[in-house]
Amino acid sequence: MAILTRERLEALLQPGAGPCISLYLPTHRHHPGTEQDPIRFRHALREAERLLAGRHPEEEVRALLDPVAALPTTEFWRHQGDGLAVFRSRDVLEEFRLPLRVPELVVVAGSFHVRPLIRCLNSNERFFLLALSQGGAAVYHASLESLSRVLVPNLPESLAAFRGGGKYTRALSGVPSGRGRGGQRLNPAGGPEDSSDADLVEYFRAIDRALQRSLRQDDAPVILAGVEYYLPIYRRVTRLKRLADTSVSGSPDAMTESELGERARAAAEHVLRGSEERALAAYRRAAARGRARTDLDEIVRDARRGRIRRLFLAAGVRVWGTVDPTTGRVRRTAEQQGSHDDDVLDDVAEAVLRSGGEVLTLPRERMPDGVEVAAESS
């Protein structure tokens, strides 16, 4: 199952052959919630079939949905996060495990419905946690709600393996040896047990190179976790542009994943809220200069011209309907009536992202002026 990145989101935004099916489910990590997830998945497939019926022949519907129906296996459900997204068209079949809960939603339209994914990539909603240990670096994609391990190709397996021949994990492993598995732990005083600083520096540089390649298109902050001895050494060698000043001090090997996540979220909260406040302050400056928009028709027209710098969307709000291709006016409907309808706010968000703008999803109470949609135009 793929890990969501900005590059993968951009690939979903590329024009393709419709119809495009977007399926979202909130999922569970533990029993008894895990028993309900497969049932809800089957219900979502039936809803997709209903939305396709009448507009597409039965053989086309089966060709689209049968591969999706074949996805769930024991392995598929074993390592879920807090949300699941599945995308299907004639030439696309993608699944994503998500670090945030998403609404239970099925959309069939001419393009993929990506707003819940955008929220998962918002710089004010999520962060990465890098847990440093001699037994192996661990990387997590995290939010203020959850923590999920991330696959990072070419990440060094451990300091000992790196020293002994530069062995790498094929993907992110693992858990450093002591975390939840009773293995060797770091010196409780905070220093390395048997490595020179030179070895440690090269080990950290190798970790940093792997992260730079994996996160190069991602603007989420990165928070460090490790013993006090390690943190300044890594900060000296890193080239990560989004490394946060705040960190989690202490051996990750001595913490459970739950403890590590709790401490990381406490460290990340002010970093994430700072990003959000800067965006809202920029909107207020734009409003003072007459460059703020809250009328949906105006926002749609500016987005189609590539003139939206930052778009704010209220979480959970959808506007079903279509956009007139000539005038840009929005025709609203009470609900999704078939595969010809889409969430207009999703279409606007896609246009903003394609033109290089930023999209932020906020709780309604933190939206500018309390509106459902707002934009800062260029």
Image (cartoon, helix red, strand yellow):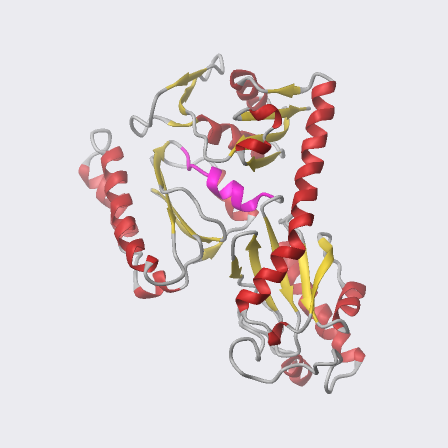
Q: Residue at x 73, y 19 (%)?
A: 288
Q: Residue at x 58, y 75 (%)?
A: 176
Quadrant placement of the N terminus? bottom left
Q: Is residue 324 magenta?
A: no
| Image position, residue 250 (x, y; %) | 68, 71
Quarter occupied by residue 207: bottom right
**Which sits in the foreground, 167 or 296?**
296
**Residue 350 percent across, percent down from the top left:** 52, 33
In front of the other: 281 or 258: 258
Report the magenta residues as a range: 111-122
Reply above or below: 94 against 198: above
Q: Toward which corner of the image does residue 238 lie, by quadrant?
A: bottom right
Examine the rendered structure and indicate whether residue 191 appears above or below residue 84.
below
Residue 274, how many percent across, how many down? 70, 43
- In this rendering, the answer to whether 180 lies above or below 103 is below
The verdict on residue 115 being magenta is yes
Q: Quadrant of the C terminus?
A: top right
